[in-house]
Amino acid sequence: MTRLTACPDAETVAQRTAAHVARQLQSAREQRGVAHLALSGGTTPGRTYELLAASPDDLASVEVWFADERCVGPEDEESNYRLAVETLLAGGAVAPERVHRMVGELGPDEGARLYAEELVRALAADRVRLPVLDLILLGIGPDGHVASLFPGAATLDAGDDAVCLGVRDSPKPPPERITLSLAVLRAARECVLIATGAGKADALAAALGEPSRHVPASLLRRERLTVIADDAAAPAAPLR
């Protein structure tokens, strides 16, 4: 069953999320010697990244990946990588060789192909199974999208062996993006979904309702999903 934590405000959401991520990374290091964390962009996660960066010991032996990226250069203001550099990575707690950037400037197809190969090399030892990330941090859009998986998109039907996908028709600019597949999100040991503000309330309620291609967040594996939301976004009805 999905675990939901409701917080009074966005700052408390960031604090709770940072503490939860730190605990899960520590658990992964204790069990496997390394922790694999995938980041998302957007306004909601940025404060969480700043709080994590303030405790560099929590980032020891962490490999940083990305859930999605816009097809722009790494210094572009739209870049999820740039957000990570300015927040989580600013203090140098994560060595550059442990940061795995989606190369968005190569375009959606080539960028997705190369990232899929890198993930498989690092996390699918037999080259058959899907790569399994320890933790994927996700925001949710007002339309219920996660990463760059949008409502009704063909990427939702990519299949159980898809790893990374190119997106050419994002309903949000820029239209070209790279995203982890739904299969990889579902294969992760845990996804943490964070939501703040009344503008996310309907999307989060739908995400915790019946699974639907019209609400990609609802397709995440509930038994591996943790939701941290402020009171404005948190659903009033019991979780399914």
Image (tube, helix red, strand yellow):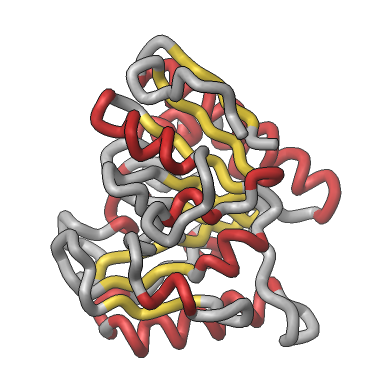
Q: Position of residue 33 (x, y in %)?
A: 80, 54
Q: Would residue 73 be seen by someone viewing this image from the given angle?
A: no
Residue extending furthest right?
A: 31
User: Foreground residue, 179 or 210?
Assistant: 210
Q: Position of residue 103 (x, y in %)?
A: 34, 76
Residue extending furthest top?
A: 8
How many labels, in total? 0
Is residue 172 rendered to the left or right of residue 51?
left
Residue 35 vs 2, above or below: the answer is: below
User: Foreground residue, 32 or 172?
Assistant: 172
Corner quadrant of residue 176: bottom left
User: Foreground residue, 122 or 151?
Assistant: 151
Q: Position of residue 131 (x, y in %)?
A: 66, 71
Residue at 50% across, 46% down: 137
In the picture, which quadrant includes the C terminus? Answer: top right
User: Foreground residue, 231 or 10?
Assistant: 231
Residue at 55% across, 77% down: 163
Residue at 37% across, 57% down: 214
Residue 32 vs 228, above or below: the answer is: below
Is residue 142 rendered to the left or right of residue 184?
left
Is residue 123 rendered to the left or right of residue 167?
right
In the picture, which quadrant includes the N terminus? Answer: top right
Residue 227 vs 157, above or below: the answer is: above
Q: Would residue 196 be seen by someone viewing this image from the given angle?
A: yes
